[in-house]
Amino acid sequence: MPSGIAAVIPVLSQVDVVDPTYGQSDVAEFEPLAPAPEPELSLEDQLAEAYQRGRLDAGEELKDAFETERMRLKRAADAEMETFRISFEDDLAAKVSADLEAAFAALEMKLSASVARCLDPLLDDALVAHVVAGFEEALRQVWSGEEGRALKISGPQSLLERLEASLGADAGRVQLEVAARTELTACLDDTVISTRLSDWQMHLQSARETR
């Protein structure tokens, strides 16, 4: 009995050689299997299938129609909202403009009234100064033909003081007498000179009431 490595090395002379042609005549040839034919649907199944297809087609058509109508309604709503927005903005602009005009008119009236209240004392004073100046001018015209004659002038003290200040050095040519009346009056024979201040005041008051 061999020992060592010789014990595991096969003996080549004892290996069987297989003939490659062995058993070829015994191999059977197989053809591939054809697919089994689908079973023919019954009339009931065909109707059910056709119904299902019809439902699917109708559903798609209904979906498309719904989407088309939704888009149409959306466009119509958008157009209506745009029209409303433009109309609202126009109405708002017109209202704001009218309100501003009314506010400016009211402000102008208030300002006019305030200015008038501030100017009224000045107007009264200016009117008195104008009347006294006119009265003084009339006196000097009378004096031009009546040299040396003194004039007697009566009236309210406030107007007499203004006239005296305005006459200056010629104040000595007049005799001033305080009287309970609103006008300055000068008498020289049949000639009477009056300031007519009340008439001017009536005109001024009328102008104030109509403004």
Image (tube, rainbow, N blue to C red):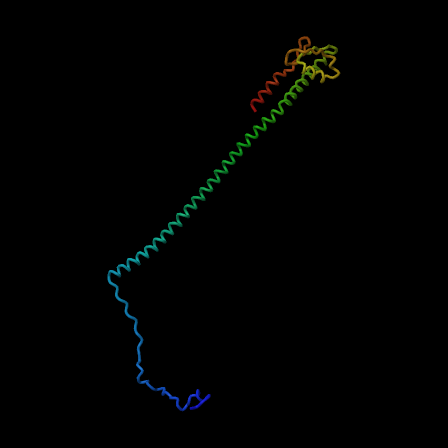
Quarter the C terminus occupies? top right
Relative to the observer, which residue lies in front, 77 or 122?
A: 77
Could you tell me residue 50's position as x and y percent? 28, 59
Could you tell me residue 101's position as x and y percent? 53, 33
Could you tell me residue 89's position as x and y percent? 48, 40
In the rendered view, does 142 fall on the left or right side of 18? right
In the rendered view, does 87 fall on the left or right side of 45? right
* Picture layout, residue 147 above or below residue 123: above
* Picture layout, residue 13 above or below residue 147: below
Quarter the N terminus occupies? bottom left
Q: Which residue is located at x 70 percent, y 13 percent? A: 142
Relative to the observer, which residue lies in front, 69 or 136?
A: 69
Relative to the observer, which residue lies in front, 32 or 116?
A: 32
Q: Which residue is located at x 72 percent, y 13 percent? A: 143
Q: Which residue is located at x 75 percent, y 10 percent? A: 148
* Picture layout, residue 160 above or below residue 90: above
In the rendered view, does 117 fall on the left or right side of 31? right
Quadrant in the picture for residue 144: top right
Q: Which residue is located at x 67 percent, y 17 percent? A: 132
